[in-house]
Amino acid sequence: MTDTNLSLDARLGPFTVEGMALADQIFDLVGSAIVDGVLEPGEKVNDKEVAAALGISRTPVREALQRLTWVGLVEVSPSRYTRVTQVTDDDVLSTLEHIGMQASTALQFAMRRMSADELVEAVSFLDRMIAASRADDSDALMAESQAFIGFLVAKSGNPVFIRMMSETNLLVARNLRHVRQQEGSAAMRAECFEEMRNAMLLGDADAAERWFRTQHGVGVDTAL
């Protein structure tokens, strides 16, 4: 949690205009501040104050806030407020379901397009995920899982899918910021990861996807 008594420019940190579009930079900066808790749930975000803190005009800030609203990190009530959204238990569950389905799609794309060396690299993520799961190391498991999914998305070879995942990255990270491995799930997760690892090495994308979805608890008929 960040000291809200600090000035906004101190909380957002130093800002330097780079080569990318200014609105995109503000989107990343403010979005990351929300994900990290620098800007807290329910906190008002004023375009004039943000612009003044960063020493820029209000136009790119407004564009960035509109995009953050579309993503779901910010909510707007006309003539009343623009503020950081709250994270509910339902939001967390919906996000877990979403990332489970989208990660499975990323796996399907990547399995069809990865080189042999890239497959070995993908499996190395799973090896670390298995080790973290068996050690019940929630922080390591979350970090390796996010890196694994990011790798699969990057290797998906589908620009539309990559852009779609990029647009929701900040929301997913914020909603799952405090999620940790569930109690009693370490052995089950490790088994799913091991079976997925075996399927990937055999080139069986469908089997790997089924195990990935089983691990996430989505899209699988457990009665079958």
Image (spheres, rainbow, N blue to C red):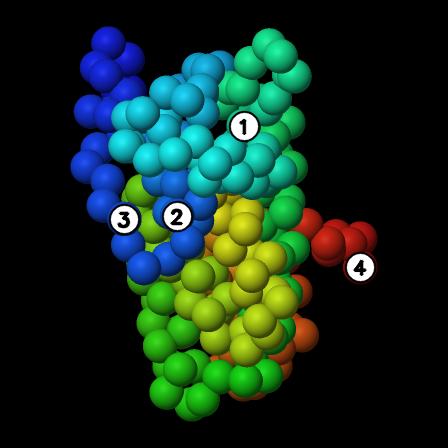
Name which residue type carries label 1: Val
Mark 3 vs mark 4, foreground winner is 3
Asked if the residue under mark 4 is in contact with the one under mark 1, i.e. CB atoms within 8 Å, the reply is no
- Most foreground residue, 217 or 151: 151
Mark with earlier residue (1, 2): 2
Mark 1 falls on what kind of element?
A: strand
Asked if the residue under mark 3 is in contact with the one under mark 2, i.e. CB atoms within 8 Å, the reply is yes
Q: CA distance from mark 2 to mark 3?
A: 7 Å
Mark with earlier residue (3, 4): 3
Mark 4 vs mark 2, foreground winner is 2
Asked if the residue under mark 2 is in contact with the one under mark 4, i.e. CB atoms within 8 Å, the reply is no
- For residue 224, the mark is 4
> Which residue position holds label 1?
74
> Which residue position holds label 2?
22
Q: Callout 2: few (<14), some (14-19), or many (20+) C-alpha neighbours within 10 Å?
A: some
Name which residue type carries label 2: Leu
- The residue shown at (36%, 29%) is 51
Quadrant where the image shows the N terminus: top left
Mark with earlier residue (1, 4): 1
Residue 200, image x, y percentages: 52, 78
- The residue shown at (35%, 40%) is 29
Mark 1 vs mark 2, foreground winner is 2
Quadrant where the image shows the C terminus: bottom right
Residue 113, image x, y percentages: 54, 84
Mark 3 vs mark 1, foreground winner is 3
Mark with earlier residue (4, 2): 2
- Most foreground residue, 157 or 29: 29
Q: Callout 1: few (<14), some (14-19), or many (20+) C-alpha neighbours within 10 Å?
A: many
Mark 3 falls on what kind of element?
A: loop
Q: CA distance from mark 4 to mark 2?
A: 51 Å
Q: Callout 3: few (<14), some (14-19), or many (20+) C-alpha neighbours within 10 Å?
A: few
